[in-house]
Amino acid sequence: MGVSVHVISDSNALSKIESAWNALTTKHSNNPFLLSGFVKQHMEFNHSKGWTPLVLTMSFGDKIVFASLLKTGNKLGVRFATFLSKSWLSPDFIVDNQYRETCMEHLLDFLFNILHCQIVDLILPAESPNLQVLKQKCKAKSISFFTTPAIGHMIIPVNRTWDEFRNSRTRNFRKKFKKIEQNLSQAGLWKITSAEKGSNQLGVVEKIFDVEKMSWKEEWRVRAGKKDTDLLIILAGSQHMAEIEPSFKWDVWFLELNNQTLAYCLVIQYKEVAYLAKTSYDKRYEGFSPGICVLNAVIRELFNGPTKKVDFLTELPFIKIWTDLRMPRVRVVMSKSSALLNFIRFTLSTKAAKGILDSLSKKAPFIAKLLDSYIN
């Protein structure tokens, strides 16, 4: 019996196989952002931005054994494919291990021989079992393949009590948060509250957006004419998955001072891992360090529950307050044109790259943007 490949390009079609999709994801992945609720949101958003969502499934008989969330575009004659979601959500291929090699071979055939992609650009977790198989299959098919480090994510293993963890950090760690709490107490009555499943979801979302409207990021979004689509996708996806997936849970934690919300942290819990998905604070209260205050309260609470790992999803410098443990990600670039791949890999590693980009940005902005992604 051979493998059959199916292409899904709109979220309504995904709804028809939602149960099978989530069953495959739950069994063969620990990443909640690969569940159907989030995939649907990413499909709709990317379609609205002119991308073509390319959700692939592969089946043996009636059994789905492979799923991938990709998008494709064609600019200035260059056809390329990349993951549907952003790299900080750690996208990857969802594969039944028994069929991994066969599915990777069919994936490459589809991307390069049917879609005729010239560039496939993916950022994968460094520990992904798909990396080595992709490399082997590319070599067998004479597809040029190279990797380069990408932005990773910081984690905290939860394997001791909160007091043991706190004492393992520096003295400055304990002093820092003691000082923050003292400053809050001097300013009035403050508290950390949690809004779990079953709370007034509309009220919770309104409080989140009240904080976002006063965050430093809002000024940038207004100037750029953009919305916080990451937050919208995570909220919509979380609400949907909490209704249909028992192992999925999401909470929102708020820091309040004198009945004013200063900061929030949205936490997704799945398979004993807590993902700190979104955190923001009201810039008017920046002197109280509200962002790290609410994060610390959330982390402390997670040490008292079933959580085995806390994942920050990114590696911003302030995260070193809590941990130095980094999980790497890897950028994988594949192309049938070795010349194109070498141009991307070597030319942009030189000091002249910035000058090239400045020139291209005026004459060919898409190419400049494409090449700039390989520098950054």
Image: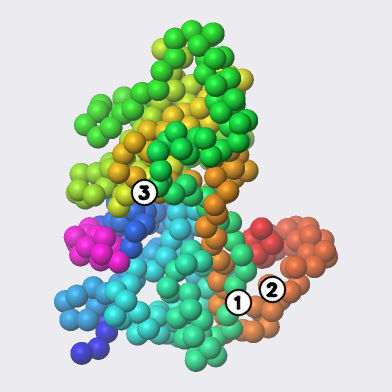
Labelled pair 3, 2 in contact (Cβ < 8 Å): no
- The local crowd at label 3, few if under 14, some if 14 to 19, many if 20 or more residues have their Cα within 10 Å, is some
Labelled pair 2, 1 in contact (Cβ < 8 Å): yes
- Measure how far apart labels 1 and 3 are at the Cα level: 34 Å
Check residue 146 in the rendering and tell me which mark sits there, or answer none. Answer: 1
**Identity of the residue drawn at 44% across and 49% down:** 157
| Numbered disc in front, either 1 or 3 | 3
Question: In front: 61, or 72?
Answer: 61
Q: Amino acid at mark 2?
A: Arg
Q: Which numbered disc flags the more N-terminal residue, 3 or 2?
A: 3
Q: Quadrant of residue 319?
A: top right
- Helix, strand or loop under label 3: loop
- Measure how far apart labels 2 and 1 are at the Cα level: 8 Å
Q: Quadrant of residue 355?
A: bottom right
Chain part drawn in magenta: 15-28
**Identity of the residue drawn at 66% across and 79% down:** 340
Quadrant where the C terminus lies? bottom right
Residue 273 seen from this side = yes
x then y, percent, for residue 294: 47, 29
Residue pointed to by mark 3: 308
Check residue 345 in the rendering and tell me which mark sits there, or answer none. Answer: 2
Q: Amino acid at mark 1?
A: Phe
- Helix, strand or loop under label 1: strand
Q: Amino acid at mark 3?
A: Lys
- Helix, strand or loop under label 2: helix
In the picture, measured across the screen, residue 155 lies left or right of residue 35, that is right
In the picture, measured across the screen, residue 117 lies left or right of residue 273, that is right
Residue 356 seen from this side = no
